[in-house]
Amino acid sequence: MKKRRYSSPYLSRDYFSKDIFPHTVYAGRKAIRQPTPYRQHDEIEFLLIRSGEGCMTVNGRSYPAAKGSLFCFSPSHFHKLDINKGSKLEISECHVNTGLYFFLTACPYHEADSAAMPALPLYALLNESLTQQVTGIIDDITAECEKGPASENQSLFFLLMKLFGILEKYRAAEA
Amino acid sequence: MRSQQKAHPICGRPISGIFTGPDKFLTLQSVVVREHIPPVAEDDSLFIYVAAGTGRITINGVVFDLVPGSFCWLQSYHVFSLESDWGTALELQVLVYDYPLSSYMTYRPNRPAQLNNLSTALPVFDLAGPVRQQVEGLLNEFAMYSEDHDSGANLIKSAILGQLSYAFLDLCTQYSATHTHLRHQWPLGWILSLFIAYSCAEDLDPKDVAESFGVSVPTLNRELRMTTGMNFAQSVSRARINLASAAILFSELSFHFIATYCGFRSEVAFYRTFRELKGMTPQEYRDYAIATAGTPRKMVSETVERILFYIHTNYREQISLKTMAQDLYISENIIRTLLDETLHISFKDVLSDCRLRYAEALLAVTDMPVLDVSLASGFNSERTFTRLFKARTGITPSAYRTQMTGGAV
């Protein structure tokens, strides 16, 4: 067999690999008391601040992290979270495989402005009722994840799509 | 709800375009029916929820009673007419769930097993309890975004349509599990139109079909005309054109392929039938539906998505058009043309975009030397990196780092 020069995720996989569909999804609630250092991961992360105050720094730019802040980080976003003194942050987060981003933006009714993933993280400041709705969606995702593999769970995909839609709809204009 | 052996006849050929149309996608329509509305055959699937009033809906020759809380999912093979009870108004909420969207939502090639239940169960259910609350909640949520047509709102609405369809499929699964013995009660016209919708892509001969259902060809045509207003040949052409008009939205499919895929003997036959039924040629329809309709729909092929995903996961390694073509089993020329035609970009642009973005992040966040940054983000040399970086941002990498960190690192 011809030896390949470069490693590729496709070498070990099926020819019709379904990487763009949801297959790795996990979600949950967390309470954070300590500031976190810079982190980067090869997944899309949705992060909602449910209560508390702090400051989110992404690639050197800072964003206020208050109740109702919803973020979406792609693999090129290094992010760290600072917490105001005496405060405790309650967050809901949801990680999905990167390929899903391309499938979501390929929705027939979605007009993507570019082929690449966004340069700046998507950021939205939601009001009270939307914060509750998004918390509910992430809780539902957590519940759906326990039911079985994500690749066969369509309701999970609809929830992720709604989450992404809310973020797109209410995202703050880029400075 | 009653089903009967004998079909309830309709009069005249059904009309289309009452509930669907370019300006009606992803919009909540409130419809009030005060008397009888003539038979309708739409080209896309519809959700109908009865908010108030009572009446009847006749679907393919079968009469169903409508009460507040009735929830219907009508497909393109359903010919239906609505009628309100004497002296009352039937208040309906109508949503269009078009086939391109639904095929996207079910991941295109994979047909979940539940869809099989859809054809054997009822198209109308009377909701009660938690399911009714769930459906009403989803409809109210949809109404909030009904007038917005930006990308975000469209995604939310598409997700709601998906959730509605799954709520309906759950009902179908429950029904099929408990009512297996009732299927023989449907009239022949009902069964025939289902059969045509599901096997229109094959070569259908009226003689064979009539024989397999145990009737003569005139009976076949009469039964179909009585329940749907169209004879066998008309029903088959309509089903095929419906299939084709969803496939046409994938701009990289050739008309020759679509014609064979939808069961036409030749491309000429496909063109002729398409013009007869849609009033325009396939090419005109493609231009109209993709670019100029009220809510344009664009289908991005899965291949393009996989190409983009490949670049975005592997940009830190030394990939080129050649290695990608090898790994994805797609020819280099096809990759080039696909990217250029659908997204108007080149492979190099996407690749350097990804690499520069990652490099920018590394510059702002870490104190790695510029050479390390350029190698870590997939560039071969510091010079290439600096040249591209300057072309994009207008400053050198080290100046960018000073600007982002304020000289702290």
Image: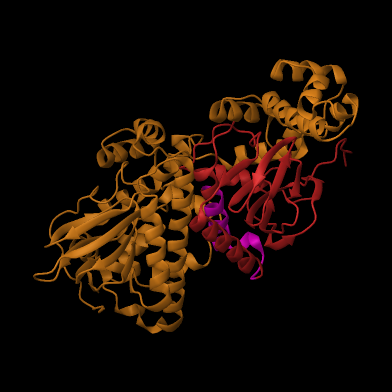
Chain drawn orange, letter? B
- Find residue A6 and report its image quarter: top right
- Residue A151 is a magenta residue: yes
- Residue A153 is a magenta residue: yes
Can you say which quadrant of the picture contains the N terminus of chain B?
A: bottom left
Q: Position of residue B205 (x, y in %)?
A: 34, 56
B106 or B11, which is in the foreground?
Answer: B106
Q: Main secondary structure of the magenta part?
A: helix
The residue at the point 40 percent across, 71 percent down is B133
B192 or A64, which is in the foreground?
Answer: A64
The residue at the point 43 percent across, 62 percent down is B164
The residue segment tinted magenta is A147-165
Residue B385 visible (yes or no): no
Above or below, B7 against B229 in this view is below
The residue at the point 81 percent across, 30 percent down is B363
Judged left or right of residue B42, residue B9 is left
Q: Position of residue B249 (x, y in %)?
A: 44, 39
B350 or B376, which is in the foreground?
Answer: B376
Chain drawn red, letter? A
For the image, the number of numbered tags is 0
